[in-house]
Image (tube, grey):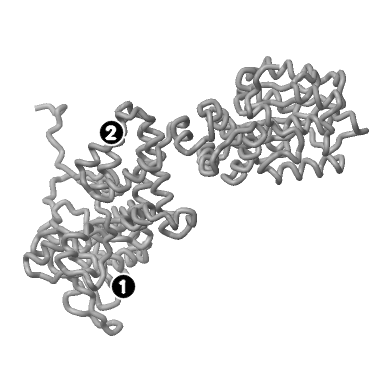
Amino acid sequence: MGYVSLYRKYRSQTFDDVVGQDHVVKTIRNAIKAGHIGHGYLFCGSRGTGKTTVARLVAKALNCIASDGPTPDPCNQCEACLSIAAGTAVDVIEMDAASNRSVDDVDALREGVKYPPMRLRYKVYIIDEAHQLSPQAKDAFLKTLEEPPPHAVFILATTEAGKIPVTIRSRCQQFDFRRGSIEEIKSRLAYVAKAEGIAIEDEALELVARLASGSYRDALSILEQLAAYTDGAIGVKDVHAVAGTVDEDVLLEIGETLASGDLADAFGLARKLINQGGDVRELLKSIANHFRDLLALKVGADPKRSSDPTWKAQCEKYSHQQLLRAIEIFSAAEKDLRYTEHEQLVLEGALLKFMLEPNEDYRITAAVSPEEVMTKTKPNAQFDQALVSIGKTEPTTSKTSAPGAKHSDGNGQRWDDLSDDYDPFSEESLEPPTQPEKTEQGKAVPGQLQEIQRNWQKVITYLQKVMKRVSDAAVAREGTPAAFDGTTVTIAFERKHKFHHDRTQENAALIAEAIEKVTGLQVKVATILQDEPKSQRQPDQGTTTQEHPQKDEIITMFDGREVEPGPDPWEEE
């Protein structure tokens, strides 16, 4: 027999040999022992976690002829077990859905499942990459999967469980295979290395386990490459050379350069790394992992490196926030590399982005000077500077918002003074906001009516854009605050706007809420009708034009304005 790859040679042949999937193995063995054999199983999990291996073990357990029936401990010596392990059993059909995904392929499967097994106890169908079946093939497969003949068992394996329709998942027992931990993969690698007579350092074993990303098969493939690469014992440098990863000394050099803040050194380092010809994507991934290791060391989660003076010295040069930023920046750069061929540009950009962006976490406290507040506080910095320059107020770190600043309605939604003629830096706007005076119930305070009148347009805007009451804002726009007795605001409408008057009276509570949000005054709202002032009456022209009751609502909805009609082009001269 020719050479066999390590991941095939050391494929688990018994349930006891399966690593890292105890929850799956225990459930299946107990079900077989109790005689509760399902007709459909769905194995989900990432690559190299043992889905197909366990599927073959289930086929062995159901068909081992060394026992009178299905057994949780197949013998691996009978004809059935040996033929299944070799892939020659005629009654164990392995189907790759990636290349057999059509309705015709499923029809052939449905025809074959009708016939009983030729040599074994059960006919087992193992459908690998089941999510690759076409939608029509999945639909055609449903009835057979729901009510198969008693001699048939279906095992579906997939790396993308989300693409399996719920109609199929509900007809199967689903098992989720988890990724192997570093310790589990390292233990399996040590077992295989010892069996093959491969000498490998413990640090190199751990590095291979980390590079495998939870896949047992990937780990064995890397170990196989390392065994062919080296003549003697496999070391960490050999792993970096074969896998294309970055040596620890290089990562420490990158950490020192970023800590120094020397931009010229960063450009030189990027050029040197590119010239070495390594995989830039792997380099960016390694840098992100390096800062992750520094963060683990800084918080005391890496006892292994706690006694290394080089790592400890570099760790002290970064804050927790800086290490988190580095991880985010280089992880994002590794993703960006998928969409561009300018590898050096992406690498240089990531290095410089970390060095140029501010690394301090600005928080305004009592110890911060007013000058630092003006230079470091981004929100409303220009507005605060304007206040100081005209002598209206002193620099402050309070959260009180000024006129013209953005406000919140309490639900996280922002709103602004949307008047076209509002200038946040005018003398009037820069006056410090006045707080409403507390008064006894029923006693008006001079100036409060003027305050409501001055902010009436803001009340309408708040009602329209924050409270989302567009039509109510349109009808209330025709009214004017005419009186305030300390408790109730009276909104006056002309008699021709009786419709607007009635609608506003119906929504008095909403208008009162908007007034409170804008001015801070807790009021009630009443409405009155009054005669149109003589100065505003139009001269009688002999004809009366009836105004559409929804004109104002339409103007508000489309943010329009009313214009005088032009001459009628069809009018005879």
Q: Which amino acid lies under the numbered mark 2 shown in the image of this protein?
A: Lys
Which residue occupies the extreme bottom position in the image? 440
Left or right relative to 437: residue 64: right
Question: Label 1 sits on what residue type?
Answer: Val
Q: Position of residue 269 (x, y in %)?
A: 27, 38
For the residues labelled 2 and 1, the Cα–Cα distance comes to: 72 Å
Quadrant position of the C terminus in the picture: top left
Residue 429 coordinates in the image, percent (x, y):
13, 63
Instruction: Say whether residue 179 is visible.
Output: no
* Horizontal side of residue 261 vs 230, given as left or right: left
In-image side of 319 versus 481 (left or right): right
Tell me if residue 490 comes above or below residue 332 in the rendering.
Answer: below
Depth check: 496 or 356 in front? 356
Please give the label number shown on residue 308.
none
Disc 2 is placed on an element classified as helix
Residue at the image position 24 percent from the left and 56 percent from the top: 416
Q: Residue at coordinates 34% horizontally, 56% vertically from top-left? A: 313
Residue at x 64% of width, y 22% of height: 97
Dot 2 or dot 1: first in sequence order is 2
Which quarter of the picture shows residue 434?
bottom left
Label 1 sits on residue: 523
Check the picture and name the quadrant holding the N terminus: top right
In front of the other: 138 or 360: 360
Marks 2 and 1: which is nearer the front?
Answer: 2
Marker count (numbered): 2
Does residue 523 show up?
yes
Disc 1 secondary structure class:
loop
Can you tell which quarter of the image residue 105 is in? top right
Give coordinates of residue 424: x percent, y percent.
Answer: 14, 58
- Judging by the rendered image, the residue that carries numbered circle 2 is 272
